[in-house]
Image (spheres, rainbow, N blue to C red):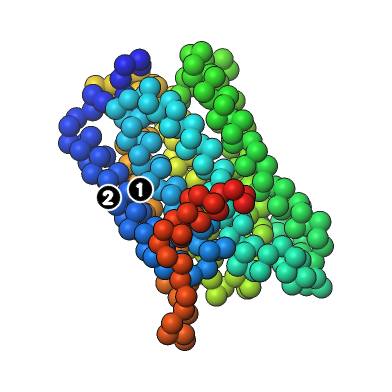
Amino acid sequence: MAGSGSGSRLPTDVLVLAGVSALVAVLVSTVSIVLQLKNYRKPILQRMVVRIMLMVPLYAISSLISLFSLEAAFVIDAIRDIYEAFVIYCFFELLIAYLGGERSLLIMLHGRPPKPPVFPVNLFKREIDVSDPYTFLFLKRGIIQYVQVKPILAAATLILKGTGKYNEGDFRADSGYLYVSVVYNVSICLALYCLAMFWVCVNDDLKPFRPIPKFLCVKGILFFSFWQSIAISILVAAHVIKQLGPYKDAEHISLGLTDTLICIEMPIFAIAHNYAFSYKDFIDPHISFVARMPFYYAFRDAFGNGLSRI
């Protein structure tokens, strides 16, 4: 597939639709991020929100680039993959920050009754002691492991693609795609499960911060997009999908269809993120005048100096 994109020879109207959709997603996300920065009243929380919201335009841009140039996508896809792990970390830190930090969280959970675990763990474990600090440590490690595994997988993918052994959408034993997908799936499932279990433990405490739409947005863009690509690869391997425009080889069909769908879906995710992570959450309606950080310093905090504190 050298010298081409995953869908550069698709019909023009399909490419235009993908391009316009990606542009809309970027514009909506940009407006949402600018509104956050112009209403930057709670830096500890909002810097994480801004970084989470960047995931949508990054997905849209990387998928659009992949449609036209796999050489350029070779690098930007690796950046996107690593940023996915960063988003999981940011969301976890956001939830902890909502609750006042780790120390306040552990004090708050002390003495609380056990909680039933989320399916499927509830099939063999009846309850989880949320008051035990080691429970929080286990959940934290389960989330952070994805942050550590994802960059390794991104590097492995780069090496496999460079040596021609990755073979997107190929589930044969000699395909690197199979092994990367299995490890990735195990890692992200564990991370999202621990994130869900953590959310169950502190659900009542997080209610004022509207955690459900936020959790669904983060889970949706990471989990749904991954499983969509896996489902497409399975359908292509099973010869249910045999052709995509002029393409008849499995790799072009899998990549081209996945990239096109992601471009088209991103405006929906951009709107959902705008709702879930609204800047209005940080405006107290009972206080008329609240100090806010000037835009320049808000931008530096979210994208510059704030990153050095991670």
Q: Residues within 10 Å of mark 2 (few under 14, many from 20)?
A: many
Label 2 close to label 1 by CB (< 8 Å): yes
Where does label 2 land, which residue? Answer: 24
Q: Can you tell which mark lies on residue 266? A: 1
Name the kind of residue labelled 1 in the image: Met
Q: Name the residue: 30% across, 20% down.
A: 4
Q: Residue at x 22, y 41 (%)?
A: 17
Give the Cα distance between marks 2 and 1. 8 Å
Judged left or right of residue 221, residue 144 is: right
Residue 259: quarter of image: top left
Residue 169 picture quarter: top left
Image coordinates of residue 171 in percent, x first then y, are 52, 23
| Residue 185 coordinates in the image, percent (x, y) | 59, 37
Q: Is residue 274 left or right of residue 210?
A: left
Q: Nearer the viewer, mark 2 or mark 1?
A: 2
Residue at point 72% right, 48% down?
Answer: 141
Q: Residue at x 50, y 62 (%)?
A: 46
Provide residue 186's location: percent of width, then percent of height: 63, 38
